[in-house]
Image (cartoon, helix red, strand yellow):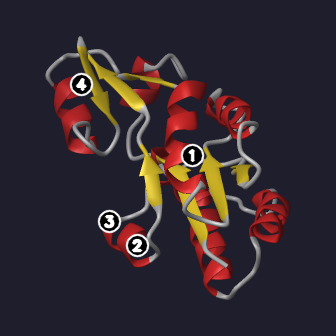
Amino acid sequence: MRIKITSDSTCDLSRELIEKYEIEVLPLAVNIGDKACRDGVNAMPDDIYAHVSAGGDLPSTAAINPAEYGEFFGRYASEYDAVIHFNISAEFSSCYQNARIAAEDFDNVYVVDSRNLSTGQGLLVLRAAELARQGMDGAAIAEQMRADAGKVDASFILDQLEYLKKGGRCS
């Protein structure tokens, strides 16, 4: 069974892992000042840090729209038995809802709300890729990942509060 694992760019996986597991990543839109960019394509963390350090506002992101998801899923749905797509938590973005809308046009596309972001989401993506390599079918992988999403607990430590302050998250 041929299974394609895909994710939005918030999974923050390294290029090496993406290549090793043949994962396709759909980048979110990032607006840095008046420049429209794509996460991981022409908007890298260092670009964001440099922009803010130079006095710029925090960049904003935009959810991927259903039409773009539909085009993305269409590239793989006819070539693979199943496509399993992971999104940043539905609590943080409308990406999951938009992906679900687009997936309605395909019988073999399964959308998983990671209920996480960054490495929490990345762990689920990698586990799904491993299960696909072991021969599990697409529906079973998606079901397992939805169950596992609630078990992932990702944390991070801040070395400064500057970005939280700029983003209005703290005074």
Specify which label sits upstream in the sequence, 1 or 3: 3
The residue that mark 4 highlights is: 52
Q: Are marks 2 and 3 in contact (CB under 8 Å)?
A: yes
Specify which label sits upstream in the sequence, 4 or 1: 4
**Residue drawn where x is 63% and y is 51% of the image:** 86
Q: Position of residue 129 (x, y in %)?
A: 59, 74
Q: Position of residue 165 (x, y in %)?
A: 44, 21
> What type is the residue that disc 4 sits on?
Val
Q: Nearer the viewer, residue 54 or 29?
A: 29
**Residue 113 vs residue 46: left or right?**
right
The residue that mark 3 highlights is: 15
Label 1 element class: helix
Image quadrant where residue 19 sits: bottom left
| Distance from Cα at disc 1 to Cα at disc 2 | 21 Å
The residue that mark 2 highlights is: 17
Does 23 appear above or below 94? below
Specify which label sits upstream in the sequence, 2 or 4: 2
Label 3 element class: helix
